[in-house]
Amino acid sequence: MRIGILGLGRIGAFHAETLSGLDAVDSLVVTDPFADAAKAAAERFGAEVVDSPDALLAAGVDGIVVAAATDAHPALILAGVEAGIPVFCEKPVAKTMSEGVEVLKAVQGSDVPIQIGYNRRFDTGFVNARAAVQSGELGKLHTVRSTTLDPAPPPAAYIAASGGIFRDCSVHDFDIIRWVTGREVTEVYAVGGNRGADYIKEAGDADTTGAILTLDDGTIAVVSNSRHNARGYDVRMEIHGFQDSIAVGLEDKLPLRSVEPGVTFPAGTPHDFFMDRFTAAYRAELTAFTEVVAGARPSPCTIEDALEAGWIADACTLSLHEHRPVTIEEVRQG
């Protein structure tokens, strides 16, 4: 099949590399406002370069991958749907939830599939964790712990446009908690601090946060996030049930150092970047998209899924600023 890529920044170029290695993909068509980025992709992957999204949609592509700036996501999703072309779009659907809801309304009734990029759904550990929950082998759940710790904060310009740590970083934890447990979040309480980069505080954001999520069956989920984890990129989940407990990310590249005598685990070189931690997951995610394009499976992460994670992020943001518990229904109703 022939896949178009809109946006060739860090993640777009990474997707181009991944797609170029998939058996199902015969050719790539790319476009980016920065001509040098498009030219580089053409040289590396033998891609065809076009000068606009309209030209890409008219280039005979079977599916499109939207990796452009967040502000462009709504228009590009809608353009793909209008052209009848299956869409893969990196999260979020839009910069704000109100815009995201408008996108959802605009595509309702369409049979053009849309997949939103939440790659943890394709990581083997999280897939196995979901299967364990669904099988009942853990018994009724009581506690979930989800962690995302970055080795260093992104640049100031990125922070200023990110929408805040809950919408930019924690939202991955929120999505995977919903997906693994099969439950919805009803209420949150969030706290945050600034112990590191001054520009994060100046942007009105926190660099380290904690959130308690109450799920609709009474399970408690604890989410921990930070922009500062000098040992590496740390993504983990613990799922505790009345019959068993399991962990995702408990492997030799885990960026933790044990101080117990005689313990050598973890012994590997710690993960230091999200693309390192989730290389296989990204490949599986885009492989799934080629199956969506081929009509072999439905979207594995819909706009509705992405918006649910977004509501949780908005609730946590409000809770942090107002120092109080916030229900999902409160933010959903505006």
Image: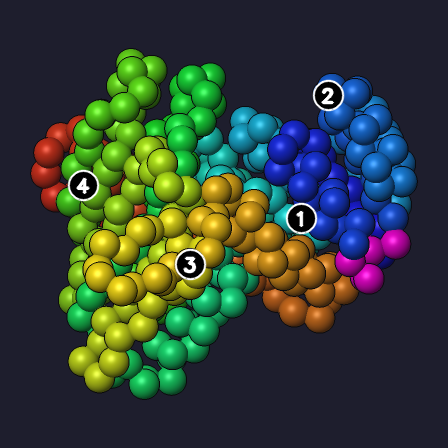
Residue 257 in percent (x, y) is at 31, 51
Q: Nearer the viewer, residue 159 or 313?
A: 159
Q: Name which residue type carries label 4.
A: Ala
The residue located at (79%, 20%) in the rendering is: 35
> Looking at the rendered structure, which numbered label has been put on residue 190?
4
SS class, disc 3 = loop
Q: What kind of secondary structure does the magenta stretch mostly adopt? A: loop
Residue 264 in percent (x, y) is at 34, 62
Judging by the rendered image, the residue that carries numbered circle 3 is 267
> Is 10 contained in the magenta span?
no
> Looking at the rendered structure, which numbered label has been put on residue 194?
none
Question: Residue reaching furthest front?
Answer: 262
Per the model, the C-alpha gap separating discs 2 and 1 is 20 Å
SS class, disc 2 = loop
Mark 3 or mark 4, whichever is nearer to me: 3
Q: Name which residue type carries label 1.
A: Val
Asked if 192 appears above or below 132 in the picture, the reply is above
Instruction: Work out which quarter of the rendered image holds the C terminus and state it.
Output: top left
Per the model, the C-alpha gap separating discs 4 and 2 is 38 Å
Q: Do the residues labelled 4 and 1 touch (CB within 8 Å)?
A: no
Identify the magenta region: 22-26
Mark 2 or mark 1, whichever is nearer to me: 2
Q: Quadrant of residue 176?
A: bottom left
Judging by the rendered image, the residue that carries numbered circle 2 is 33
Q: Name which residue type carries label 2.
A: Pro
Judging by the rendered image, the residue that carries numbered circle 1 is 87
